Image (cartoon, helix red, strand yellow):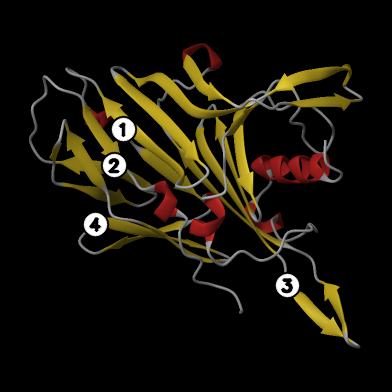
Amino acid sequence: MRPGLFTRLTCAISLLACPASRLAAHTHETEKVKNLLAVTSGITGFEENKGQFTDQEDKPVPFVLFKAGAQGVDFYITENGLTLVLLQKEHKAENGKHADTPVEYARIDMKLPGAQIRKENILAELPSKDFTNYYYAHAPQGIKEVRKYGRITVHNIYPGIDWVWHADAAQGMKYDFVVHPGADPAQIKMEYQWADIIPQEGNSSIRLHTPLGDLLEGGLRTFCGEKEIPSAYTVKGKSVSFRIAGYDRSKDLVIDPPLTLMWGTYFGGNS
């Protein structure tokens, strides 16, 4: 295990229960991230939580199911949905030397009301060949052979609907909602916390405003077999759902919010 990794995990995970007003009160060794699309393209998989993730009191956080991260950004698949933690750190020159200033954090929660996200309905596929062994005070015998997975499927997150995550080193992260025949895509609702939602381009995309800047979610695409189905976001306050044109309900419908573009461009901050 690399030095400092536990500190990073503990610090970032502690933010999952931290009020937004306190998100700028920590320090970290991460550079400011300006192009998160490039960052997420380096993510190779989702690390399963087998007890190695803890909060600042070294207590396990079983509600965190998987984690993926790169420089300046951490993604957590939780029992409530998705949590994203952005980290920004400024470097200022003092007397010809770089001096680190405290890092600022921004957190976005994307909760899925009514969703069933539990280990027992998750299928993890494409395991990594390498693994990590963790040795902590709360687990002196070790938490061993912790692997990353290239695909995570949460079956029946809503009745007849799967939530499928993909991670690829070249293309980054993405997720799909797969609506099986007979299921209603109107069940899917996403509630955002710690960010303001700004619809863009006729609701074909949305912008999420955070204290560190704005994040752009790319154009929504929806497919029934090979046929692309017209679709758009519906925004009501902090809630987002999908408006989808008629399609053949005897076939699977794949709703594809482009996560690699979702966190694609960091608009705020200094150069």
> Label 1 near label 2: C-beta < 8 Å?
yes
Task: Please tell me which residue is depicted at 29% across the width and 51% down the height of the picture.
Answer: 235
Task: Give the labeled residue for mark 4.
Answer: 203
Q: Tell me which label, 1 or 4, sits earlier in the chain.
A: 1
Q: Tell me which label, 2 or 3, sits earlier in the chain.
A: 3
In the rendered structure, which amino acid carries the disc numbered 2? Answer: Ser
Task: Please tell me which residue is depicted at 70% across the width and 27% down the height of the picture.
Answer: 61
Q: From what the image shows, is residue 145 above or below residue 211? A: above
Under circle 3, the secondary element is loop
Give the numbered dot on residue 188: 1
Q: Quadrant of residue 99?
A: bottom right
Give the left or right position of residue 36, taking residue 199 as reference.
right
- Give the residue at the far top of this rendering: 120
User: In the picture, which quadrant includes the N terminus?
Assistant: top right
Q: From what the image shows, is residue 104 above or below residue 167? A: below
Give the numbered dot on residue 241: 2
> Label 2 near label 4: C-beta < 8 Å?
no
Q: Tell me which label, 3 or 1, sits earlier in the chain.
A: 3
Q: CA distance from mark 1 to mark 4?
A: 17 Å
Under circle 1, the secondary element is loop
| Mark 1 Cα-neighbour bin, 10 Å: few <14, some 14–19, many ≥20 | some
Q: Nearer the viewer, residue 167 or 265?
A: 167
Q: CA distance from mark 4 to mark 2?
A: 11 Å
In the rendered structure, which amino acid carries the disc numbered 3? Answer: Glu
Q: From what the image shows, is residue 225 above or below residue 251? A: below
Q: Tell me which label, 4 or 2, sits earlier in the chain.
A: 4
Q: CA distance from mark 2 to mark 3?
A: 36 Å
Task: Give the labeled residue for mark 3.
Answer: 90
